[in-house]
Every structure is written in structure tokens, then in C-alpha cells.
Image (spheres, rainbow, N blue to C red):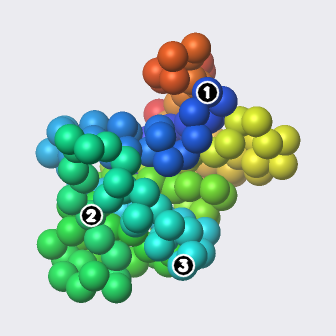
Amino acid sequence: MSEIGFYRLTRSGLEEALPRLLEKVLASGQRAVLRCPDKARVESLDRALWTYGQDSFLPHGSRADGHAEAQPIFLTESEDRPNAATVLVLVEGAPFGDLSAYARCLDMFDGNDAAAVEAARERWRRARAEGHKLVYWQQNERGGWVKAREEGG
């Protein structure tokens, strides 16, 4: 079973918090698939990852860039995993799909949106029923992550 971390964004937006988490994934020697709800969001996050910091670089790409198997971070709106990633990052309610190939899943959602919070709660209940280890993270005042809850495993 995969470990699923639920990341409730309350202090910063996705475009600010996502690069920091992806940097940690790469620093740990892992690859990631970033699954978005649709192609338009793949394209906008692709642009955001290129421009999020002047002195930072996150190697990434999507199907449109080619060489999918070589991308340390692969952005997609589907369940493909061409880069042999061990970490799946879900944004804005993108579906879990088959998690069997992933050691970890990071589910990032807008904690200031009641519908997004309720949808995340439903994903938590479903993942608990499937036997995954669950960790709930919330942002502190500075935008850092604090573990608030852990279940299963």
C-alpha cells in the first residue's frame, strides 16, 4: 500500500507550495508524476514551474516536450507514468487511479475552498478503506508543513 499525504493549502497557493514539495522529492533521489485535472492545468503548471524562482530549477516536462521517460518530474492529466516515478503528486482533485506503482502520493488541495475540502475528505475515507497509510499536513503561519494527523500503515 502507498502512503498518501494530504496537503491542505491555507497560507499559500499551489504555484508557491508545489515547487517546494517537488524540490524535496528530487532531493531525496526520487522521480515524480504530477497529475492535473486537465490539459490546460498541465500547461499552466508547466509554465509556473519554469518561472517560480530566479535561482531555482526543477527539471520537468510533459508529453508535449517529448522524452517523457527522461523527465524527473512528468506532468500529465492521465494515468501515464513513463518516467518510472515512485511519487505521485495530485493537484486540484485529480484522481488517484492505480497507486500500486507509487511508494508515496501527495494530494494537494485548497483548504480555503469548502468543496475542495469536502472532496479531500471523501478521498481520505476511500483511501482509508483501501488500507493506505494516511498523513494529513497543514500549513503553519509561514507556509511550512506541520503533520496534523496520521492513520494506518
Residue at 21% over, 59% down? 59
Q: Residues within 10 Å of mark 3 (few under 14, many from 20)?
A: some
How many marks the image carries: the answer is 3
Q: Residue type at mark 2?
A: His
- Mark 3 vs mark 1: which is more N-terminal? 1
- Mark 2 vs mark 3: which is more N-terminal? 3
- Mark 1 vs mark 2: which is more N-terminal? 1
Q: Which residue is mark 3?
A: 39
User: Between marks 3 and 1, how big is the CA–CA gap?
Assistant: 26 Å
User: Between marks 1 and 2, how big is the CA–CA gap?
Assistant: 25 Å
Q: Residues within 10 Å of mark 2 (few under 14, many from 20)?
A: many
Q: Secondary structure at mark 2?
A: loop
Residue at 62% over, 34% down? 8
Residue at 58% over, 14% down? 141
Query: Does 111 sit left or right of 105 as displayed?
Result: right
Q: Whole-percent x and y of residue 23? A: 27, 41
Q: Whole-percent x and y of residue 84? A: 23, 67
Q: Which residue is mark 1?
A: 11
Q: Residue type at mark 3?
A: Lys
Residue at 71% over, 36% down? 111
Whether residue 136 is visible, yes or no, is: no
Q: Residue type at mark 1?
A: Arg
Query: Does 148 sit left or right of 85 as displayed?
Result: right
Q: Secondary structure at mark 3?
A: helix
Whether residue 51 is visible, yes or no, is: yes
User: Between marks 2 and 3, how big is the CA–CA gap?
Assistant: 16 Å
Judge whether 129 appears above or below 66 on screen: above
Q: Whole-percent x and y of residue 104? A: 39, 46
Q: Which residue is mark 2?
A: 60
